[in-house]
Image (cartoon, rainbow, N blue to C red):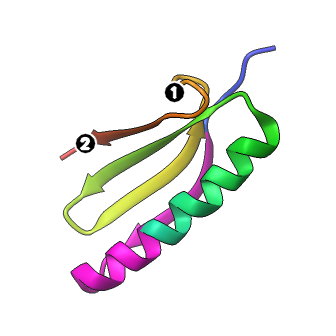
Amino acid sequence: MIEAPELLATITATSKSRMDDHLNAAVRAAEQRARGEGRRGILVTRVDHARVTVELSPDVPYGYTYEKQNI
């Protein structure tokens, strides 16, 4: 079975503090989901200056969080 990334959240910034709050909440939710399955890690991708995605990815080892920038 081939696993694909699972997008859990797309966060668009209206301010830095709001971005931080939403990003932290999304990562906490992703951690809970990852613990429940025990297979994929978390990938946080900065899509542009105002947008970030959080996903469970088979390319990230379970128990790890990787960050990537696409800008």
Part of the protein shown in magenta: 6-23
For the residues carrying marks 1 and 2, which lies nearer the camera in this image? 1
Classify 10 Å Cα crowding around label 1: few (below 14), some (14-19), many (20 and above): some
- Determine the residue positioned at 41% across, 48% down: 44
- Say whether residue 49 is magenta: no
- Determine the residue positioned at 34% across, 41% down: 67
Q: Alpha-carbon distance for marks 1 and 2?
A: 17 Å
Q: Is residue 26 left or right of residue 47?
A: right
Q: Position of residue 68 (x, y in %)?
A: 30, 39
Q: Position of residue 16 (x, y in %)?
A: 23, 79
Q: Which mark is residue 70?
A: 2
Q: Against 65, is 33 above or below?
A: below
Q: Sequence order check: which comes first, mark 1 or mark 2? A: 1
Query: Which amino acid is tagged 2?
Result: Asn
Q: Against 55, is 52 above or below?
A: below
Q: Against 34, is 16 above or below?
A: below
Disc tally is 2
- Say whether residue 18 is magenta: yes
Q: For the residue labelled by badge 2, is the local secondary structure a helix, a strand or a loop?
A: loop
- Determine the residue positioned at 65% across, 31% down: 40
